[in-house]
Structures are given as structure tokens and as C-alpha cells.
Amino acid sequence: MKRTPPLLLAALLAASTLASAQPEPDAPANGGAVGLAQALNGETGTTTATYGRISRTAYTLVLDGELSLRDFERAFARAGNRVNPREMAELGTILQGRLPSPSTTTFTVSDEAKQRAVDMIVGAGLTDEGRAAIENDETFAGTPLPAKVKQVLMIARLNGAEAYDVTETDSDGEGRFTDYPSITPATENMAFDWTEVTPAALAADIADVRSQLRIAGTARIQSLSVTVGRYDVTTGGTGSISASYDEAYHPVSASSPMGFRHLLIQMEQDWIADQFTIDDLRKARSRSNDRWASNCAILADGSFHCLPAIRRHSATSGLILTNPALARGKRMLWNGHIRVRKGKVVYIGTSGRISRLAARGRYRFVNPVPLLEAWGFEMDPNLQVVSEHSSARYKADAKRAILHD
């Protein structure tokens, strides 16, 4: 397990705000070790900490004047599997070396407790696999997870941002966060390393000079009574992300090269089998020559993912993939749509259901803009996250890194 950089720990008790926080003089040139003070000072809290069961447990543990790692783990365990916003506020207060009012108890917090606190709070409510990714400073795709990203995640989680399960239902059996299914495995064109979007991935897409398949349109095969995709060959990428949607049949589910060719013969496009594989077709570019569609989600590790341009998967070939499909068994922090032009993010919008839940105060969600900045994306200087709901309007708080009522 990787240890949180010492600089992060020293900065936990500093008094700077998000806007003014600066790396210590000996911080790495890439800004990897960025202070987390704003996650723990009072200026970032939107939920007032109250003296609850976590505080009562902590009180008995700090009678010796110190909160050790074991003490913090025991206090954290009192929250159970799902840490709610008020419990997060309690934990944030405790990590400052004090208990919530009316208690006046103060104490020191050990370096070990500070080290583990970052990963425990960011990984709260996740599976063992999810927590392991956070602790190893990696995304689910294996990409290094920048310290700045963990900083934003900790700020957001301490301020009540939900790590939600898109398959969760309410008491009536209706989807709580979406009405669309999430049953697609993380394979083929839905593998995490194919859907993940980072500044480096966008740059690599711009530099890509390979010949690839591109969706060129659709055609109706009367003998089969079906509309199918039409493809041509394109060279190079765009570093852009735009909307991609069609209801045509795409042959993504052939179980063998022979079956793939047979499907293409029926589609009157058997030339494709002479030059490309079925995996090449699954990863074909959109009509705009883009690798990704604009449907986007932030997974619980803080990584951005977009659907592939061909929104089909062999496991569910008759299903047009939507945002919840990006979960692939992981929790989400946000979902909506993103538009990118030649590597620059020009639009980010929160899906209607998530917007409504945030506006009504039911849940808080991660604000994607501070997270984009933490990843180092080039962004339009006027970029703001917008609600894609017809009427629901939430507050987008950049300092606290959340969307809330």
C-alpha cells in the first residue's frame, strides 16, 4: 500500500483556503503533493458538525490526549458502511483535533491517522477493490491518480458528496438515480482503459495517425427489415468529444471471425473483414471522427469516463448504452454530458435526475469543474457546470467541490 505523501499530512492542519492554498517549497514540480487543509478547515464545511455517535466514540478514545490511527479507525467504523454528510462533518472536525460543540475537548492527531484519513474518507462506501485503487493512487483503469485529484475528492466527500450506486432503487422499486440499466461488463469497448478520458488520452487521440473505422451513416437492408450501420476508413483522431447516437444495428456480438464476416456479408459490407477485426469495429469512431460519445460519468476513484462512439456491447448488443452503463459495478460521483474540442473542455452538464436530486437537497454530488481542473484538463475560461433538467437548479460550489441545494 502506498503512503500518503508527508507533505499532505503536514498541510492537513494548515489554515489556507482552496483559493489560496499553495504547495510547500519542497513540493514536487508537478504539484503532486498538494495541501489538504481546505478539506479540514471550517471554511469548506457546508454541514455543521454535531456531536453524534462518532464523537461519543472519539471522546472515550482521546482521553490520553491523542487520536491514534487505531482510534480514528474505531471512530470511523461507527459510521457503518454508508457515511452520511453529518458523519463526514464529524470526521472532518475530529481530524482538526477537536470534538464538535458543545464539547470543548481538544487533542493531537497522529501522523498515521492523518495518513490513513485521506484514503478512508475518499474510499468511504466503496468496495474492497475501490478502496484498494484509492490507496494505491490508481484509477480503475490503472492510471496514476494525482494527489490534486484526491484533494478535491476529500473536500467533496467531507462536504457530503455521495458515492452512489446507479442500480439502487427506492421503496417503490424505481431507480433512485436513473431509470436506465447498468448491466454492461468492463470489457471490449467498455474496458476502463478505453472509456477513461484524461488530458493525456485526449493528447494521444490528437496524435493518433492510424487508419480506423468510422461510422459513415446508416442503411436499410430490406431483405432483413433492419437498419444497419455504414462504415468507412478514416485516418487520425480529433481529441474531441461530441454527441453520438443512432438506433442502427452494429455487428459487435459475433463470436468468431467467420461469424463476423457472415454478418458483414448480410450487411453488404464484407470488405471490412478483409482489413479490420470485430474489436476494430467495436472501437470505430463516430461520424464526427471522435473516439468517445459525450455521455460522461465520474467514477468513485475520481476518473472521467465517456461511452464509446459505437454505443453497443456484445453482452447487450440490442441495448443502446447510456450513462449508467459506465458504472460497470463501480459507484459514481456524478454523471451527465461533456463536450471537448481539440483537447479543450467547452461544456459540462449534469444529467436531469442528478440535477433534480441535488436541487431538492436529497443528495450532494461532486462538482466536476474543480475535478477537471485537478486532472489538468484544458478548459474554456468561462466553463461552468449546468443543469440539464428543465427546471431544477442546484448550487455549484467550486470551493467545496460539490453540487447542492
Image (spheres, grey):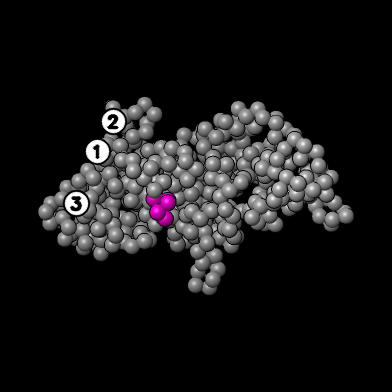
Residue at the (45%, 43%) spot, across then down? 139
**Residue kind at label 1, given as amino acid type:** Ala
Q: Residue furthest right?
A: 223
Q: Measure how far apart labels 3 and 2 are at the Cα level.
A: 25 Å
Quick one: 1 or 126, which is closer to the camera? 1
262 within the magenta span: no
Residue 313's place in the image compared with 291, above or below, is below
Q: Residue at x 28, y 27 (%)?
A: 25
Q: Please state the horizontal and vertical placement of residue 389, each as a whole percent of the image.
A: 57, 56
Residue most extreme to the bottom: 172
Res 6 → quadrant: top left
- According to the picture, the residue beneath numbered tag 2 turns out to be 24
Residue density around tag 1, few if under 14, some if 14–19, many if 20 or more, within 10 Å = some
Give the residue number, with chain letter if any, for mark 3. 67
The span shown in magenta is 127-131
Give the x, y percent position of residue 206.
61, 30
Q: Earlier in the sequence, mark 1 or mark 3?
A: 1
Q: Is residue 89 left or right of residue 390?
A: left
Helix, strand or loop status at disc 1: helix
Q: Which residue is mark 1?
A: 10
Q: CB of mark 2 within 8 Å of CB of mark 1?
A: yes
Q: Position of residue 243 (x, y in %)?
A: 65, 45
Q: Amino acid at mark 3?
A: Leu
| Magenta-drawn stretch, dominant element (helix, strand or loop) | helix
Does the rendering let one see residue 117? Answer: yes
Of helix, strand and loop, which one carries label 2? Answer: loop
